[in-house]
C-alpha cells in the first residue's frame, strides 16, 4: 500500500507540475510578444523585456496554482481510470477514502509550495521588477507620486506629506505637521527639501522649522535634522505596493501601524483572508477532483468529466473573486466571504463522491 501511495502522489505531482509549466510558458510567450509589440526592446533591448517577463513568472505561478492543481489532478486520475489502474488499486485494497487521504498529502504539499512562493519568492521578484528601469532618466526612478500634492502618511501625532519618493527611499519635498495630543492643533511645521530613510529615522536636509504658539511663530533653519518616526522602509513598501502585492506578514505589520494611528484596516484584513482563501482553494481543488472522474466507466466519458471538473474549478475561482469584491464593497466579515464559497463546493463534491461510491 505504501508503494501504491507513493505512485499516486508522484504521478499527481508530476501532472500538476506539467500543467503549471505549460500555463506559465503560455503566459510568458504572450507577455513577451506584448512587450515586444509595445516597443520595450527599442528602449532597453530584448534582454530587458525577457528579464521583465521572467520576473513576472512567480506571480503567474502563484495565481495559476489553483487551476493547475485541479487540472493536473484530474488528468492523473483520468489516466488511472483509462488504463484500469484504479481497478487494480481497488483490488489491492485501496478504498475511495484512502485515495482521498493520499491526495490530501499532495494537496498539503502543493499548498505549502504555494505559501513559500507567495510569501518569499513573489515579494522579492516584485521588488526586483520595481527596481529595474528602462532608462536612466530621473523620472524613471520615482515610484511614489500618487496625488498632485504627493503622498500623505499619518504617524501617530504627525501628518507627513512627501512630494516624491524614489526606489532607494530618497525623499524630496517633505512637509510635516506635528499635532498637539490634546486639541489636535498644529504645534510645529517642518519643511525639508530632501531626506533619506534609515530604519526608524529620517535624515532630513535643508530644513525649516516653524514653531506655532498662540501668540507668535518662531522660525528656525538647519542644514540637517534627524527625526524619529515609525515610518520605516517596510511601512513605505506596504503603502506603495498596495495590499494585493503584500505578504501576510507585511500586511500584519502594516495593519498594526494603521491601528496604532487609528486608521481604517478593513481592506488589509480582507487581503489577509484572501491569502488564506487562496491556500484553502488550492487544497480543496486537489481533493474535489475525485468527484469529477468516473472510475467505474474506465475510458468512457473521461474527457467530458475532465471538462466539467475544470469548468467547475474555474467557476469556483472566479465566483470566489466576485464574492470577495462584493463582500469588500458591502463590508461583510472577511472570513465569511473568503471561505464560505469553498466549503459549499466541498459539500457538493462530498455528496457527489458518496453517491457515486454507493453505486
Image: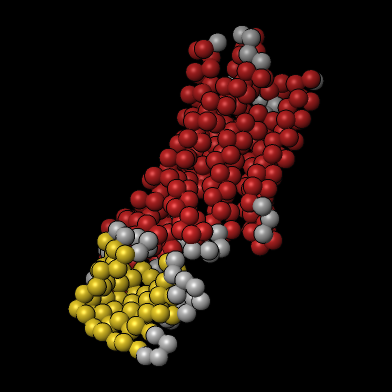
Q: Residue at x 53, y 21 (%)?
A: 8
Is 356 left or right of 310, judged from the image as shown? Answer: right
Position of 214 relative to 63 (above/below) = below
Q: Nearer the viewer, residue 182 or 322?
A: 182
User: Taking 243 as reference, is 181 above or below it?
Assistant: below
Residue 192 is left or right of residue 57, and the answer is left
Residue 41 point in image, percent of width and height: 31, 65
> How did the renderer colour the structure?
secondary structure
Give the residue at x 44% y 75%. Answer: 179
Q: In which quadrant of the rendered image does the C terminus lie?
A: top right
Q: In the current view of this chain or complex, which residue is farthest to the front?
A: 215
In the displayed structure, 29 sits above or below 285; it is below
Q: Residue furthest bottom?
A: 215
Could one spot residue 337 in this view of the protein?
yes
- Residue drawn at x 56%, y 53% as measured from the top left: 269
Indicate the quadrant where residue 358 lies: top right
Residue 301: percent from left, percent from top: 70, 31
- Horizontal relation, residue 321 to residue 228: left or right: right
Q: Position of residue 210 (x, y in %)?
A: 33, 84
Q: Residue furthest top?
A: 92
User: Nearest the camera: 258 or 260?
Assistant: 260
Residue 325 percent across, percent down from the top left? 64, 58
Does residue 28 appear in this view? no
Which of 28/125 is in front? 125
Q: Residue at x 54, y 50 (%)?
A: 272
Seen in the picture, residue 298 relative to 248 is either above or below; the reply is above
Query: Quarter of the image holding residue 264?
Result: bottom right
Most foreground residue, 252 or 322: 252
Q: How many marks?
A: 0
Which part of the image, by quadrant, shows the N terminus? top right
Amino acid at each position: 500500500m505504501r508503494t501504491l501511495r507513493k505512485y499516486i502522489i508522484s504521478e499527481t505531482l508530476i501532472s500538476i507540475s506539467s500543467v503549471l509549466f505549460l500555463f506559465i510558458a503560455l503566459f510568458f510567450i504572450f507577455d513577451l510578444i506584448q512587450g515586444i509589440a509595445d516597443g520595450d526592446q527599442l528602449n532597453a533591448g530584448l534582454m530587458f523585456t525577457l528579464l521583465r517577463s521572467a520576473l513576472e513568472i512567480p506571480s503567474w505561478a502563484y495565481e495559476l496554482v489553483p487551476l493547475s492543481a485541479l487540472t493536473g489532478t484530474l488528468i492523473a486520475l483520468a489516466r488511472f481510470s483509462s488504463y484500469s489502474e484504479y481497478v487494480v488499486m481497488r483490488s489491492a485494497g485501496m478504498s475511495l477514502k484512502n485515495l482521498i487521504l493520499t491526495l490530501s498529502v499532495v494537496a498539503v504539499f502543493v499548498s505549502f509550495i504555494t505559501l513559500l512562493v507567495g510569501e518569499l519568492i513573489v515579494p522579492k521578484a516584485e521588488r526586483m521588477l520595481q527596481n529595474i528601469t528602462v532608462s536612466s532618466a530621473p523620472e524613471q526612478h520615482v515610484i511614489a507620486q500618487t496625488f498632485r500634492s504627493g503622498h500623505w502618511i499619518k504617524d501617530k501625532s504627525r501628518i507627513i506629506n512627501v512630494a516624491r519618493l524614489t526606489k532607494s527611499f530618497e525623499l524630496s519635498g517633505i512637509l510635516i505637521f506635528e499635532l498637539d495630543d490634546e486639541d489636535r492643533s498644529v504645534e510645529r511645521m517642518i519643511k525639508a527639501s530632501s531626506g533619506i530613510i534609515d530604519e526608524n529615522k529620517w535624515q532630513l536636509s535643508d530644513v525649516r522649522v516653524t514653531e506655532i504658539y498662540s501668540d507668535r511663530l518662531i522660525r528656525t533653519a538647519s542644514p540637517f535634522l534627524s527625526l524619529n518616526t515609525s515610518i520605516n522602509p517596510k511601512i513605505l513598501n506596504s503603502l506603495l505596493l498596495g495590499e494585493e502585492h503584500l505578504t501576510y506578514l507585511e500586511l500584519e505589520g502594516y495593519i498594526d501601524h494603521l491601528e496604532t494611528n487609528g486608521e481604517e484596516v478593513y481592506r488589509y484584513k480582507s487581503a489577509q483572508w484572501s491569502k488564506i482563501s487562496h491556500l484553502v482553494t488550492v487544497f480543496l481543488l486537489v481533493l474535489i477532483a475525485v468527484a469529477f472522474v468516473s472510475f467505474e466507466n474506465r475510458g468512457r466519458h473521461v474527457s467530458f468529466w475532465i471538462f466539467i471538473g475544470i469548468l467547475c474549478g474555474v467557476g469556483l475561482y472566479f465566483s470566489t473573486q466576485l464574492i470577495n469584491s462584493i463582500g469588500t464593497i458591502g463590508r461583510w466579515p472577511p472570513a465569511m466571504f473568503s471561505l464560505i464559497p469553498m466549503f459549499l463546493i466541498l459539500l457538493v463534491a462530498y455528496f457527489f463522491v458518496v453517491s457515486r461510491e454507493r453505486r
